[in-house]
């Protein structure tokens, strides 16, 4: 049995500080995450999946579209009028260029807070679900908090593992459960006076 050829790597969208600012909204980040999982959806479908009124999403969709983060990829016929169908413009986003500016760094901190908040909400909902599995190779719900010291070699190893996790997620196919994983690695700020 021959393997299907691997998909070519997708070029990451190099975000600007302004695009990071658009993503700092928890609602806009939720839209991006939902489109990332679903591939494509109309505003009405997104509203249903996010549990929000569709009228509350329209201005967020416009901001994401104006920022070049989502695009209309088609239309779907409905009983009344056609609905626009949206998709993310890239499954990979890079903040490397934006991090060269103070506003990019500030906006990334806001995006990180929104991402962690979204993960916590998903985790809280999953913990009480009958589908939650907390052990074994099919574990789908877990939380880890570690405080440790890392020299240059250990930090390089950790970063390689984080890169491998990201690649494994990007290579995931359409089968299986939708998963959300947020990894936050940060140096602990020094104590005052050190």
Image (cartoon, rainbow, N blue to C red):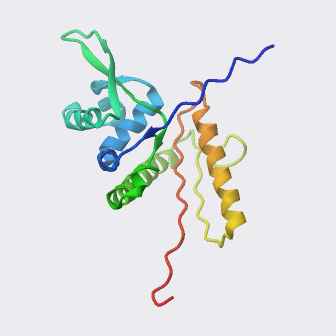
Q: Is 13 rendered above or below residue 83?
A: below
Q: Looking at the image, which residue is at 56% across and 32% down?
A: 177
Q: Is residue 145 visible?
A: yes
The answer to whether residue 68 is left or right of residue 190 is left
Quarter of image, res 71: top left
Image quarter (top left, top right, bottom left or bottom right) of the N terminus: top right
Q: Is residue 117 visible?
A: no
The residue positioned 28% from the left and 27% from the top of the image is: 43
In the rendered structure, the answer to whether residue 67 lies left or right of residue 148 reads: left
167 relative to 74, above or below: below
Name the one closer to the observer, 85 or 97: 97
Residue 148: image x %, image y %?
Answer: 64, 71
- Whether residue 36 sits left or right of residue 153 in the image: it is left
Q: Position of residue 162 (x, y in %)?
A: 62, 51
| Residue furthest right as drawn | 1
Q: Quick check: 94 above or below 55?
A: below
Q: Residue furthest bottom?
A: 193
Q: How many marks?
A: 0
| Occupied quadrant, residue 179 | top right
**Residue positioned 64% across, 55% down in the render:** 159
From the top left corner, tell me how far across and down residue 178 is, in percent: 53, 34
Quarter location, residue 116: bottom left
The image position of residue 136, as x and y in percent, is 72, 46
Camera-side residue: 126 or 149?
Answer: 149
């Amino acid at each position: 049995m021959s393997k299907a050829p691997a998909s070519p790597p997708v070029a990451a969208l190099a975000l600007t500080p302004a695009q990071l600012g658009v993503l700092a909204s928890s609602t806009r980040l939720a839209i991006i995450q939902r489109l990332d999982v679903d591939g494509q959806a109309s505003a009405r479908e997104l509203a249903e999946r996010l549990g929000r009124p569709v009228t509350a999403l329209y201005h967020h969709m416009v901001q994401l579209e104006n920022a070049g983060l989502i695009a209309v990829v088609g239309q779907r016929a409905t009983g009344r009028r056609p609905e626009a169908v949206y998709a993310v413009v890239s499954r990979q986003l890079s903040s490397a260029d934006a991090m060269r500016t103070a506003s990019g760094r500030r906006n990334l901190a806001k995006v990180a807070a929104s991402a962690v908040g979204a993960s916590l909400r998903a985790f809280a909902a999953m913990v009480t679900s009958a589908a939650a599995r907390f052990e074994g190779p099919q574990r789908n719900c877990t939380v880890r908090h570690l405080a440790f010291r890392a020299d240059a070699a250990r930090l390089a190893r950790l970063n390689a593992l984080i890169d491998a996790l990201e690649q494994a997620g990007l290579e995931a196919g359409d089968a299986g459960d939708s998963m959300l994983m947020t990894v936050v690695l940060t140096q602990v700020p020094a104590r005052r006076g050190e």
